Amino acid sequence: MQKLFTGLQPSGTLHIGNYFGALRPAVEMAGEFDAMVCVVDYHAMTSLKNPVEMRANIINATKDYLAAGLDPSRTIIFQQSQVPEHTELAWIFECLVTVPFLELSHAYKDKLAKGLEANAGLFNYPMLMAADILLYDTDIVPVGADQRQHIEYAREAAAKFNNAYGETFKEPKEKINDAIAVIPGTDGKKMSKSYKNTIPLFGTKDEIAKAVMSIVTDSAGDIPENVHAIHKHFRDEASLSALYEANKGKYKNLKDALIEDIDALIAPMRAKRDSITDADVIRVLKEGSDKARARASAKMKDVRSKVGIQL
């Protein structure tokens, strides 16, 4: 069975873009693959410096995974920091790639442009992500279109190691659904926590309504493009076309319909999430991290031997 790996940063409240871009594909694909889902807390440290928020976010992100339908009896759900082999392998990869190579990262340039601190963790981020993926002989990584380059970096890290030390790592492939590769935010840009333009995944109906009503609309046509671009992920094409045809120019009606459609999808998951306790999360992460570490440890034993540090 092929192996799937995906992860989300516990750097803030998850939004519907996270759901369509990573959570739902992971749930849908879990039955077809040997799947692993990681709460990538070390990645979050590049921007999140508050330990209280970090602990809360790890718990909340895991609840989100479970509420979205991930089954820990079928999918390994684990915490990145509980598997130290991730950072060990990242260091080995960092010793193989060059600074100019890392400087090409679109995500790094984008975050600098947004005014984020140029810390070394942010710069080396692609090699930790490569380690996340390659440790588990991953075949498929479901990602958004903006993450494609990170998978290319993972393939490059695998190739450099294999060329230097012999065949060791698989070169993974990204899985991108072009229809949902980039979910627009309330301002029309990519939905992102850092842009503060999100619709919360497990928000109350009032919170969803507040976010939807803030969607930027234009007055140039009968169809509000930004509303429609989000709405198409919640209805089939025929139903959506009929709705927008019947409400040409009636932006409030269309926003109200979007609120109802989002809440219809989220409400059952929100109820399930409310039933999940912190103790449930700690147990799931402990069991999953133990399973992940067993796999990672076996892989790193081979890696250490090949690089010459295993005596």
Image (cartoon, rainbow, N blue to C red):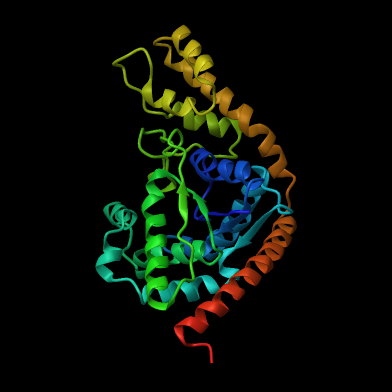
Residue 214, x across and y down, in percent: 43, 29
Q: Residue at x 48, y 81 (%)?
A: 306
147 versus 159 height, above or below: above
Residue 89, x across and y down, in percent: 48, 73
Q: Give the quarter of the image for residue 58.
A: bottom right
**Which residue extends farthest left?**
100
Q: Residue at x 46, y 9 (%)?
A: 247
Is residue 70 something that shows in the picture?
yes
Q: Residue at x 32, y 14 (%)?
A: 221
Q: Is residue 131 left or right of residue 72?
A: left
3 versus 180 height, above or below: below
Residue 158, x across and y down, in percent: 42, 66
Q: Is residue 123 left or right of residue 181?
A: left
**Which residue extends farthest front?**
167
Residue 223, x across and y down, in percent: 38, 16
Q: Residue at x 64, y 47 (%)?
A: 30
Residue 104 versus residue 249: which sits nearer the camera? 104
Residue 87 versus residue 218: which sits nearer the camera? 87
**Which residue extends farthest bottom?**
311
Is residue 84 something that shows in the picture?
no
Residue 239 versus residue 74: which sits nearer the camera? 74
Q: Give the quarter of the image for residue 118.
A: bottom left
Q: Give the quarter of the image for residue 296.
A: bottom right
Which quadrant would the C terminus be assigned to in this image?
bottom right
Q: Is residue 23 left or right of residue 231?
A: right
283 versus 74 height, above or below: below
